[in-house]
Structure formats: C-alpha cells, structure tokens
Image: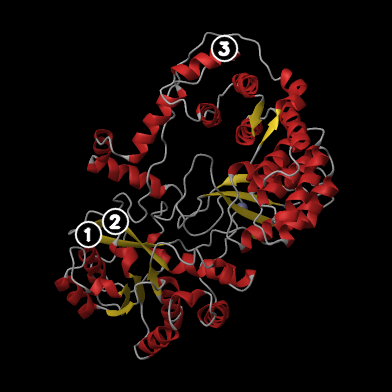
Amino acid sequence: MGSFIITNSRTCLKHLCPLLRRPLYHQRAPQKNNQPSNHPYCTKGERRPSEFHGTKHRDFTPRDRTSFPKSVFAAGNARRTAEILKRKSGADQDRDQDPDQVSTGSLKGRAAFTAQIPDRALSVSEWRDLKSSSSRPERFELRMMEGMLADTEADISVAKSLLNYVAAENGTLPYELLLKYLALCVSGGHHSEVSDVYDIMKSCFKTLDTGAYSLFVKGLSHTERWREALIILEDIKKVITPSSRNYGDAVTGAVLHGDRETAWRLYGELMDQGLMPNQETWRCLFESGVSQRAHKDELLAILTYMRENQIYPEEKLVRSIKAWFESLPDENWRGKFTSVDPGGVCRSCGTELESIQLTEEEYNQLKHRVMEDVIEGRDVFNKTTPEELESFKSFVQKRPAFDVVIDGLNVANITPKCVKSETLLAVVSALQGLNVLVLGRKHMQQPSRNWNRHDMNQIKQKAHCFFTENISEDDPFLLYAALHSGNHCNFVSRDLMRDHKACLPDSATRRLFFKWQRGHQLVLSNFIPGKKIRFQRTSRYDTIVQSHGKTWHVPYDEDGGERSTYEVPQRWLCLSNDV
Ligand SMILES: [Zn+2]
C-alpha cells in the first residue's frame, strides 16, 4: 500500500496534535499471562463408583453417579485439573527457570518494549530524540504504534503526537501506520478520531483493504455516521463475503440508533450467508426487543438455533435473554439462575430435563443420516482411499458389535511423560471384558521409543485393532465402527468431527449427533500411570437449550469459567410462565 500526501490532510491532522502534559517516560508493568494449558483427560481424584478398575463392568448408566454431581464434564474442571497437576508436578517452577520458554520469552520482550512507549504526547523533536536513542530505529514508528495497540490503557494522544511527528518528518503518513492508528482508535472506542481517519483515508485512497473496511464498519457503527458503515459493508461485499463480525457491527449500529428493521434485515442477510452469528450480535437483538412484541418469533428462533448447533450463551447474553422474556407484555415470564440436580430435575421449577439417551427412533435416524451422508460422502474420506474404507468396513462387519471404540493416538497422548504404547495398553487393559476396537495408525506398529513392540503385541491380544494409513483421519472410522455396533457402543476420544461439522447434513442431524456424542463419550477421569484408570461418562440429562411450552431452560457459561470442548456448563437459566 502507498502513502498519501500530507498536505491534503494537514487540517485534519492539526487537531490530532495533542498538548504536552505529563513527564516523559513511564515504566509499564508486563501483562499477566493467564492461559493455563488444559489437560483434558484428567481430573482430581474424586471417588466415583462407576469406574472400571479393570473389572468387567459393562454398565455405564448414570444412576450410579448421582452422588457425584461434579462431573468430569463440568465446565472448568479441565482447567482446575490442569492447575492441580501442574502444582503436583512442580511444572510452575520448571517453567520459571526455563528462559527458552516461548511464553515467558515473549512476555519479557513485550515488557521491555512497552517500557519504551512514552506515557504522554511528545513534540516532534522529542520523538526525534527518542527514535535516535532507540537501539532499533528500523520500523520504529510502526513498532511504537503496535506497542500502543497491545496496551489496553494506551493514551490516544501519544499516538496522535506520533502521527504528527511522522507527518512533519516525511510529509506523508504510510498507509500501514495509519491503519494501526485506526485499529487503536476503534479498539479504544475513540469515535470522533475514527470519523476523522475515515475522512482522511477516503480522500486519499480510492479503495481500502478489507481490514480497514472492517475497522470502519465497527468504528462508525457507534457514531451518528452509522449509515455510512452500511455503505462500507456493501463495498466489502464487492470483494469478499463480509464476516459475521462485520454484520454484527452493522447490526449493533442499527440497534444503537433505534433502527430495528435494518438490524433484522442485516441479521437475516448474515444467516442467509450461512455465517455463525456471534453472541454480541444476539445480545444486541435481545436488548433491542425488550418490552416489544415485534420480532418475537425471530428472537425465539435464535434460541432454537443455539439448541440445534449446541451453543451455550455466555452470562451477558443469558441476562439479556432473561430480561427480554420478563419484559414481554402480558406474558408473565419469570427467570431464575439455577442448577440441575444429578437426576436431571431443575432445582428452580422441578421440571425434568431432556434425557441424554437417544430414543430408538432418533438413533436409527442418526445412524442412517451419518452412514449415508457422512461416511459415504466424499468430504470426510478425502484423506483415505476407497480401498482402505472398504477394507475397514469389511473388518468391522466380520466382527461382533464393539462395546467401546478407542481413538488410539488420542488416548496414547494423554500423558506426555509416558511411553505412548504403555498408556494405550493401560487403557485397553482397563477395559478388559469388553469387546474393544482400537483405531490406530500404521506407524504405531513400527517399534520406536514411543511404540514398544511388546506393548503393541499385548494390545493386539486384548483388543481388535485396525491401523489406517498415516494420513487418514480417525473420526469417520470411529463414527462408522461405533454406529455400526449399536446404541450401546461408547467411544474414547477427546473431540469428534471438529472439522467435519459442516458434513452433517441438516440441523436435526447435527443436534442428534451432538447428543449422541455427549451420551456415548467416555473420558478418562483419573489416570495415574502404572496405578489406576477411571472412566466417566456425561450425566443422564442433556445439557442443551430446551423448551416445554411453559418453560425454557437455557444452560449458560458463567463469567470467568473456562470450559474445555467436551465439558458442559453447570449453570442454567430457568424461565417459567405459570400464570
Ligand atoms: Zn426450571
């Protein structure tokens, strides 16, 4: 991208020039790194009666577990477990002592850099001095702007003075620098500055890149010029499909300025494009509907969409949903934040929630759709050959129905410190007495440090094994084997179909698939190498948005809770309409 001649916009930039105020330098504290790594297969050592202990338990029914409501599937459990394990293993200390760790390294780098950013606006000569004293003068201005962008408390006047300096030195402002400044204005909510930059860029560049357009849609939506954001959206459409974020920002602009019809038209367009709306957009729409009869069906359709796509609202959104229901004229809805007892009964209204078990009819429907559209469809199996697929099918058909299907690679990687084949053997041994299928890759059969020949031979004695080509994907094989075996068959794997959700043909099948997954997934809830292995399965009720006419039950993610993909929320919004 080029740069533009400053004479065009000197008047605009003039009022970007700040006054000098505070002392020159300011040390900033480094940001805290709060991203613990999740370790999804372990949990703290709660006793659970439903565990295998290497015995011949076939029964996975949830009634055994009623006295242990804090399931391994409970939101936040993975994070808590990871922290406990880290403390136990002293990993915290290890990391602090290791200077090569990527996370600590980049943290130090950022801290050193933010320390350079002045905490007040500088004059042209002060910026010049700062640059000449910098150990890295190359791309100095860009790095300064990036530094401010990374700092949530950045002072916009410092950025303005930097632009002023660059303009004075060069007579032009590079596009890249201006774009970073725009990003800073948008993220900081400096609306009038966004408006100024828009005028500057529009007058100097014929077209902008989609990144700039996106920033303007977001920035302008909050101003009186929100309708111009809609024009920009049209410009984006000429190049690419706008993102759901773009649409969401435009919806927000329309709602903020009281134009509900435009908001819903944009939302309809977003849905027609097959985009996944974000929760902020939904929140905006629910809030715009408070005390309104209009658009009731569309708002209820959002709840149905969440149900079909296995989406849980965040706390902010669920509060808006509650407020909207309670505001509906003459409908007398009351909402309560509550939990559900282990038997699946709402603690607030006593309603029994939907069972996690698929009915015979639902199971057959799912099996039929998945077998026909997913397994036979080309998409999923584009990483395998028709020959491999055929040989797998006949392998499955020649054997009695499996009780458990194991994703071998996934399970072998549970504890990074152990030899992989040893972990896999331990899991297979714990399932003795059941008809087990282990899905693996061909490379696992070649003896190596991770794949011990003796372990692999033992695994082959205890379970049926099928080894796919090294490039094949496991999910479809696992699905085929499990569904072919019947409704009793469970599986051990972390996640399924993450990349293949689009292959599920329709929303009803998606809903059934997610339900089947939640009801048939076994998670290793306690694994201490060489000692004990425990499995746990999800609860007896289905954690999903649901309604029975006079009630709605909406599971939601609490603020600050971190949920691993296989975990489900534990908090519910109960809405009832008892007149
Ligand atoms: Zn209830």
Q: CA distance from mark 2 to mark 1?
A: 7 Å
Rendered view: 201 above or below 153: below
Q: Nearer the viewer, mark 2 or mark 3?
A: 3
Would residue 110 appear left or right of 226 to someone viewing this image? left
Measured in 3D between alpha carbons, the distance from the residue under mark 2 to the one under mark 3, in whole angstroms, is 63 Å
Q: Residue at x 55, y 66 (%)?
A: 501
Q: Position of residue 492 (x, y in %)?
A: 37, 67
The residue beneath circle 2 is 526
Q: Earlier in the sequence, mark 2 or mark 1?
A: 2
The crowding category of the residue bearing disc 1, from other C-alpha atoms within 10 Å (few below 14, some 14 to 19, many at least 20), is some
Q: Position of residue 284 (x, y in %)?
A: 72, 43
Assess whether mark 1 and mark 2 are in contact (beta carbons under 8 angstroms): yes
Q: Quadrant of the N terminus?
A: top right
Q: How many residues crowd mark 2 within 10 Å: few (<14), some (14–19), many (20+)?
A: many
**In terms of image quadrants, where is residue 49?**
bottom left
Q: What's the CA distance linking mark 3 and mark 1?
A: 69 Å
Q: Which residue is mark 1?
A: 532
Residue 421 horizontal side relative to residue 353, left or right: left
Query: x, y percentage for residue 258?
Result: 84, 39
| 482 sits to left or right of 326 | left
Sequence-earlier tag: 3 or 1: 3
How packed mark 3 is, by other alpha carbons closer than 10 Å (few <14, some 14-19, many 20 or more), is few
Three-letter code, disc 1: Lys
